[in-house]
Image (cartoon, coloured by chain):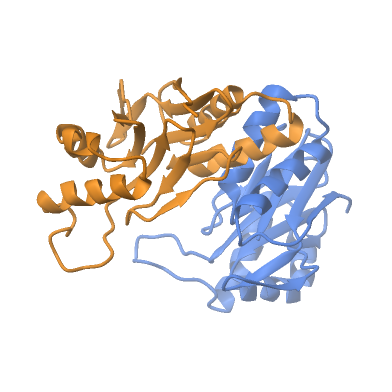
Chain colours: A orange, B blue
Amino acid sequence: MTIIVALADKKYTWLGHNDAATLGNTPMTNLNPWVRFGSWALGLSGNSALQQTLESHVSELEACDNNPSSVIKAMKSIFRARRISGFDTAKTKHKLGIWCILINDNGSIWDIDQDLSFTKIPAGVLCAAGSGGRYAKGADHATIHISCLISAKTRVSLAVNSAIVNDVTCPGSAVITQLIVKR
Amino acid sequence: MIITAITDGHEVWLGHNNTVVLDHSPISEDQNPWIYFGNWVLGVTGETYVRQFLDTNVDKLEKEAGSVSEVIRCLAEILIEENLYSEDDDNAAPSFNIYCILANNDGRVFDLDSSFSVTKIPNGKAWARGDGIDYVLGADHVIREIKPKLSNEERLKIVTEAAMANDIDCPGKAIMAKLVV
């Protein structure tokens, strides 16, 4: 598993992740969990095969409009067409084994769970997913408590590093990138 | 419920949230997970009936618990005698279905897993057991990084509140206490 984190300020949405995944107990480096398409960035943790599936069919995601439900609909369509995790069955709930963060370039952030239910994250609240998610959220609680003036970039960096330090399944180094927020 | 502890090698601080949950409903405010005996204190999370049973056997612990290995042996004997354990298979160590923090008034802090495997917690590291442990360890990393001179009492309060803010199974108030036996 991995740690992915997102937090927006007025100018940027800051994205954080660890740059390695575990294959068995072995760290594999140069991981990038973010898939970019249109006005969106989608961070994936969990089953990496599904990230590869989405990347292979990113043209279908490019067509999504600015509504998060259109992204979810496109993801379901891609998985259903490839008969992934029972999406070709009549089940109403599917456990995909992925936990995602969806970010629009207007600074809005959604948490997506493994049945693709999505929840908008309030402004100023750090969103974290993956095996190190709880370490990251605990870290952010302490960060805010100690210094309310700390930047969003630093909050993301501390959260990702806390997961890396505490969770052996989050190896590698912290990588922090930015998306420009378009209002 | 979350229990937390930190030591500087001399002085031990203990923390917990004061409310337990039944399913996800908060009940019984003013719960105290710490059992005092001799020079020791044992914080218990997990099966509440096991904790209650240990409460009723505190005299035995008082009498027989000197060293850490004697505490473990005594705890195991009390629970095995009453069949308060489970075994997944013949080769597995018995599980007592509780997760504990054990501290001595000389400044030592130990983690006890459900099989009573013991690990000494290094001085200056906050430790936790129960729901919300990951939030505690995540918060403690940040404090070490950006405010390392914070007092252990204040540090333990922040990390305990990190679990309470993020985990619905850790409701109530954060209670801090210095170990005095």
Q: Quadrant of residue B49?
A: bottom right
Residue farthest to the front, as pictured: A183
Q: Is residue A73 left or right of residue A42?
A: left
Q: Which corner quadrant holds the N terminus of chain A?
A: top left
Which residue shows up at 41% across the image and 68% down it? B87
Q: Viewed as shown, does residue A180 lie left or right of B130?
A: left
A75, A168: nearer the viewer: A75
- As drawn, is A61 to the left or to the right of B108? left
Q: Is residue B46 above or below residue A108?
A: below
Could you tell me which residue is drawn at 63 percent across and 62 percent down? Answer: B45
Image location (x, y in percent) of residue A45: 35, 40
Residue B30, relative to residue B109: is it above or below?
below
Q: Residue at x 42, y 36 (%)?
A: A103
Q: Is residue B167 left or right of residue B36?
A: left
Residue A31 placed where, x, y %? 31, 25
Q: Residue at x 64, y 70 (%)?
A: B21
Q: Residue furthest right?
A: B180
